Amino acid sequence: MRHGLLLIDERGRVVLASGRILNILGGREGVISQGSSLREVLRIVRRCAGGAWGQVRAQMWSHVRARLPRPHAEHISGTFEMTLQQHLLEVHLQPVTGGRWAVAFEDVTARRAAEAEAEAMARRDPLTGLPNRLLLRERLQEALGRLRRSREGCAVLLIDLDRFKPVNDTLGHPMGDALLKKVADRLRSTVRPTDTVARIGGDEFVILQTGVREASDTQALARRLVDLVGRTYMVDGHLLTIGASVGVALAPGDGSEADTLLKNADLALYRAKLDGRATYRFFEPEMDARMQARRRLELDMRQALARREFQLHYQPQLQLEGNRLVGCEALIRWQHPVRGTVSPLDFIPLAEEIGLIVPIGEWVMRQACRDAVTWPAPLSVAVNVSPAQFKSERLVEMVMSALAASGLPATRLEVEITEGVLLQESERTLQTLHRLRELGVRVSMDDFGTGYSSLSYLRSFPFDKIKIDRSFVSDLSSNRDGEAIIRAIAGLGKSLGMTTVAEGVETADQLERIRAEGCTDVQGYLISRPISAAEVLKFLTAAPRNQ
Ligand SMILES: Nc1nc2c(ncn2[C@@H]2O[C@@H]3COP(=O)(O)O[C@H]4[C@@H](O)[C@H](n5cnc6c(=O)[nH]c(N)nc65)O[C@@H]4COP(=O)(O)O[C@H]3[C@H]2O)c(=O)[nH]1
């Protein structure tokens, strides 16, 4: 029985005593029963408490005294806890009618132990047993408190696993879980007992390093982490390799609040990932400034569509045989009321990263089709389509809808993709490209020659056009390799039945050499800079070029 009850009358006599819990109070020292006086009860409890009496008395009186306006027990009400014979008893005092009062006991030892366990579990990651975000935060706050008192520095190392997602996706979650446990073991093995290793997200870990005297202490740990996590794992018969990117913030230099340190470690981690992953970076104040600038750009960009700040400019493309204009490439321009003209090179990468390229790209596609339908047939329009747009399921439907809404025949639309598009989920991407081709849309490979494996991509999809990157064209004047490369690509295009366009042609000399090397088309400032939609019609209908 976990409960017990004493009813005490106005003269301090026990008039009712029930419940086996009273045995705990009395134990071998005596029995609390009907007729015992309060004094007797206290004496029994005192004997039962033995050496712990001082503590028991303190527990009782801290509650009772605080509530005693007069030395009358009937005024006492409320609850307190006391520990007797390893039992934690919750004691409720309650005045009842006739000047009597009731004392109810409950043995809460097991309940409190369960509560304590649940509380401890609420601070642990169930998979690895490591502290979770909550406990990490508490430990970090403790460390920062010590820092204020003793000037003992600490460091937050935020670790993100590189290439963990493919393991989880392709080999399944049990394998991913097993791998995470191994990572946790390795992290634990490389820190001191006073440091904390926590898991705060799917594949995100944090190490709180304490007792840091110099940044080099933390640098050594960061280097060790990158090396250790990057070593091969054997999980269930599979050899797996992942990596670690680490962002580091030091206290007090990079902040003396938990939130600031975690945020700054995150900024440093972002940098480490941008710098190619499998590396560590220490926080620098410029990272914060850069991130804020990025956030402002993001906000502005989100509004730009609604505020109609985007425009399309078009750059004509010339077919060398017969000096005939064959179409234009659509190039986005952003006219911001305060920033002025923002180059696509400054906002397209961010738009891709945050997925905003999908609505922006849709606007470009629809506008380009609407403009191109006003040009004389068979002039075509080329639209850049980003890798992130290929991830969106709707790309083909969106293109069909843009064509249908504008009335532009599919054969007058061309999509330009870069190697980045083919790098991702190639099967699905190839399917999308084939579906576009089935519609009649042409597909060209942009920036050819700048990526790692441009040649192999030519085998994977029958492109209509190869656009030779302008760096090879600008090399023409200075270096003979440029000429050889252009000749090779032009030859390749010819034998594969593809058009070859040299980009960035600025001088008559470049044009002649390109013609001599066998390219079929050119695009560049020599023909025309990108011009506004209004200027395009005039340009397209003007007399044929005579370069
Ligand atoms: N030095 C030199 N440059 C020349 C010459 N001729 C053309 N250019 C520039 O070269 C870039 C050609 O576009 P890109 O390679 O597709 O490279 C584009 C493309 O990757 C991206 N971009 C532009 N518009 C869009 C768009 O609507 N959607 C997507 N996804 N990306 C776009 O931004 C990049 C830069 O665009 P822009 O700044 O407009 O820069 C354009 C164009 O203005 C020349 O003779 N000399």
Image (spheres, rainbow, N blue to C red):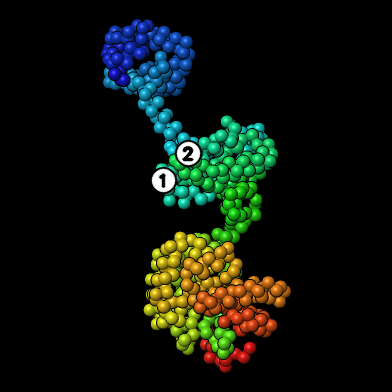
Q: Residue at x 58, y 46 (%)?
A: 246
Could you tell whether 422 is left or right of 79 in the image? Answer: right
Q: Secondary structure at mark 2?
A: helix
Q: Quadrant of residue 488?
A: bottom right
Which residue position holds label 2?
181
Q: Amino acid at mark 2?
A: Lys
Mark 1, Cα crowd under 10 Å, few <14 / some 14-19 / many 20+, is: few
Residue at position x 52%, y 83% in the image:
327
Asked if disc 1 is less than 8 Å from ligand 1, the answer is no
Please tell me which residue is depicted at 38% across the width and 17% down the height of the picture: 72
In 3D space, how far apart are the residues under numbered discs 2 and 1 (Cα atoms)? 12 Å
Q: Nearer the viewer, residue 369 or 161?
A: 161
- In this rendering, the answer to whether 353 lies above or below 521 is above
> In the displayed structure, would residue 40 be above or below residue 539?
above
**Is any atom of residue 148 visible in this view?**
no
Name the element at disc 1: helix
- In the foreground, 391 or 313: 391
Residue 310 percent location from the top left of the image: 52, 73
Q: Which residue is mark 1?
A: 173
Task: In the rendered structure, find residue 396 and report the number of the disc placed on it.
Answer: none
The quarter of the picture showing ligand 1:
bottom right
Looking at marks 2 and 1 on the same chain, the residue that comes earlier in the sequence is marked by: 1
Residue shown at 56% from the left, 90% from the top: 322
Q: Are marks 2 and 1 in contact (CB under 8 Å)?
A: no
Q: Is residue 406 visible?
A: yes
